[in-house]
Image (cartoon, rainbow, N blue to C red):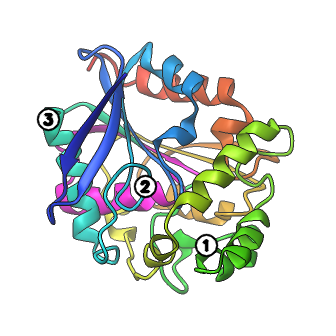
Amino acid sequence: MAIREAFGRDGTSLVYRVSGDSAARPLVLVHGWAQNSACWGDELLANLAERHRVIAVDLRGHGYSGAPESGYDDSALWAGDLHAVLQQEGVRSGAVLLGWSYGGLVLCDYLSVHGTAAVAGVVFVGAITSIGRGRPGGTVGTAMRAAVPGAMSEDARVAIRALGSFGTALTGPDASGVATQALFGTSLATRPRVRSAVFARDVDHDATLRALDVPTLVLHGTADTVVDVASGRHTASLVPGATTSWWDGTDHGPFVADPARFLAETTAFTGALGRP
């Protein structure tokens, strides 16, 4: 696995990891709020890399990427970040973009600016696609509502309690304690100002979804307490010909709750696209 760096439009350092055959179809993984590229797990990344050129990104403000003081409310910057990584990797066509949670919003930021010239398919996993009061593509669940605003606090005691209230929402009740602790630790390690700033915008990507002209998979747990399944259903209702996969009883982290099923469904989707 190689660790590489690109730079956003404002000069922000964007760190990402690459694995797999360079001739294979690019699969770009975009994590969610207060996480990073390690959230997918080493085993799942290795399994995906057997069939894809996996590009797992640390979003601005997250992981090893730079954390500028401002700009988190600018969709054009988020779009530019993903574009910069694709350009750095020489990806001009055939990529599959996969976004989990907040990562789905970043995919839409990119698609709204750059379209699908470099894209062969899109996968939304427990994702929001819009953000702001009353936006149906950004409907959050009970765990997220309970965690806000405490999860954004500079006070460690408040933040720990609020983020801890997520419990096993990211992993599911049957996930190992190690996985739960790792994701909790990543959330806590994300700067409080970033945790707060990424939500300080109002963006509607419904028009972008209606115009999406590449195969799209919407995968969402029906018991998601972070991003309500209503968000996934809204996305699926807008994208022409979208394929859906509703995971009965699964919370916010399908790829953690059942990595084998997630791998099977992801590779089936990318495989149906044909050779890159």
The secondary structure type at the circle numbered 2 is: loop
Q: Quadrant of the C terminus?
A: top left
Q: Nearer the viewer, residue 82 or 71?
A: 71
Magenta span has 114?
A: yes
Residue 245 sits in which quadrant?
Answer: top right
Query: From which residue to which does the magenta span run?
Result: 100-126
Residue type beneath disc 1:
Thr
Residue bearing mark 2: 239
Q: Are marks 2 and 3 in contact (CB under 8 Å)?
A: no
Residue bearing mark 1: 139
Residue bearing mark 3: 92
In this picture, residue 190 sits left or right of residue 151: left
Q: Quadrant of the N terminus?
A: top left
Magenta span has 93?
A: no
Q: Is residue 168 visible?
A: yes
Crowding at dot 3, Cα within 10 Å, few <14 / some 14-19 / many 20+, comes out as: few
Q: Nearer the viewer, residue 273 or 62?
A: 62
Q: How many marks?
A: 3
In percent of width and height, residue 139 lies at 61, 72
The residue sitting at 14% across, 35% down in the picture is 92
In percent of width and height, residue 272 lies at 42, 22
The secondary structure type at the circle numbered 3 is: loop
Q: Nearer the viewer, residue 206 or 50?
A: 50
The residue sitting at 58% across, 52% down in the picture is 186
Q: Is 234 located above or below residue 239 in the figure?
A: below
Residue type beneath disc 3:
Arg
Q: Is 165 located above or below residue 88 in the figure?
A: below
Q: Earlier in the sequence, mark 1 or mark 3?
A: 3
In this picture, residue 91 sits left or right of residue 142: left
